[in-house]
Image: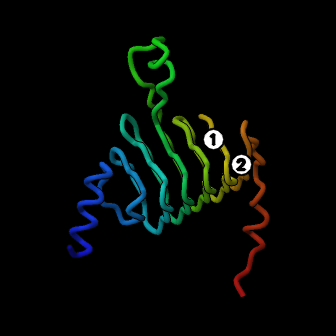
Amino acid sequence: MDSKAFKKMFLTMMNNKDNPYHPLVWINGDPEIEDNVYIGGMSEINARGSRVYIGHHCDIASFVAINVADSHLLTLGLSDENICKEIIIEHHVFIGSHSVIKGGAHICHHSVVAAGTIIDAGYIPPYSLIYGNPMTVKEGYYKNRIKSYKVL
């Protein structure tokens, strides 16, 4: 069996579709992903039920979950449907390994999500450093660093 046939069979067995990132990146729905985006293996982007936008030059590490859906109320019998909320990740955002981006999150440009961080719904300003669970946001943390950075 040639490699193309094997890849097709593998993706079918894993209930996954082909993507330009890695065969072990799961993409559900139709997220809007701009140019020069890296997505590491074992990451998931679930855009089924709402919009996911990922801007240019983003780096999403391995084992990251980006998920518009929250089914806990449905599971508990407190709702008749999944609650799905839009996720916006602007340009030049780094998301560290083992992070979770929940529905309703809006991460502005030139921000860093540290490894293992859980991003809740809400607006995160540009140049922020976000870390922890519950998340802590250091607004403007990278603003002066980026403006003073010079390529040698």
Relative placement, left or right, of 146 versus 59 is right
Q: Residue at x 48, y 54 (%)?
A: 54
Looking at the picture, how far across and down is residue 62, in whole percent?
54, 59
Tag 2: Cα neighbours inside 10 Å, few (<14), some, or many (≥20)?
many
Looking at the picture, how far across and down is residue 20, in whole percent?
36, 66
Q: Which residue ends up furthest to the front in the rendered image? A: 1
Q: Is residue 125 above or below residue 121?
A: below
- Assign a secondary structure to mark 1: strand
Label at residue 56 = none
Q: Amino acid at mark 2?
A: Ile
Q: Residue at x 58, y 62 (%)?
A: 92
- For the C terminus, give its image quadrant: bottom right
Q: Is residue 97 above or below residue 36?
A: above
Q: Quadrant of residue 47?
A: top left
Q: CA distance from mark 2 to mark 1?
A: 8 Å
Instruction: Out of 116 and 129, give the one closest to the viewer.
Output: 116
Looking at the picture, how far across and down is residue 139, in whole percent?
76, 48
Q: Is residue 104 above or below residue 38?
A: above
The residue labelled by disc 2 is 130
Q: Residue at x 36, y 38 (%)?
A: 48
Instruction: Out of 15 and 100, give the one closest to the viewer.
Output: 15
Q: Amino acid at mark 1?
A: Ile
Q: Is residue 80 above or below residue 113?
A: above
Total of numbered circles in the picture?
A: 2
Tag 1: Cα neighbours inside 10 Å, few (<14), some, or many (≥20)?
many
Q: Residue at x 47, y 69 (%)?
A: 36
- For the N terminus, give its image quadrant: bottom left
Q: Which tag, 2 or 1, sits closer to the chain's start?
A: 1
- Assign a secondary structure to mark 2: strand
Q: Are marks 2 and 1 in contact (CB under 8 Å)?
A: yes
The residue labelled by disc 1 is 119
Looking at the picture, how far across and down is residue 103, in whole percent?
51, 36
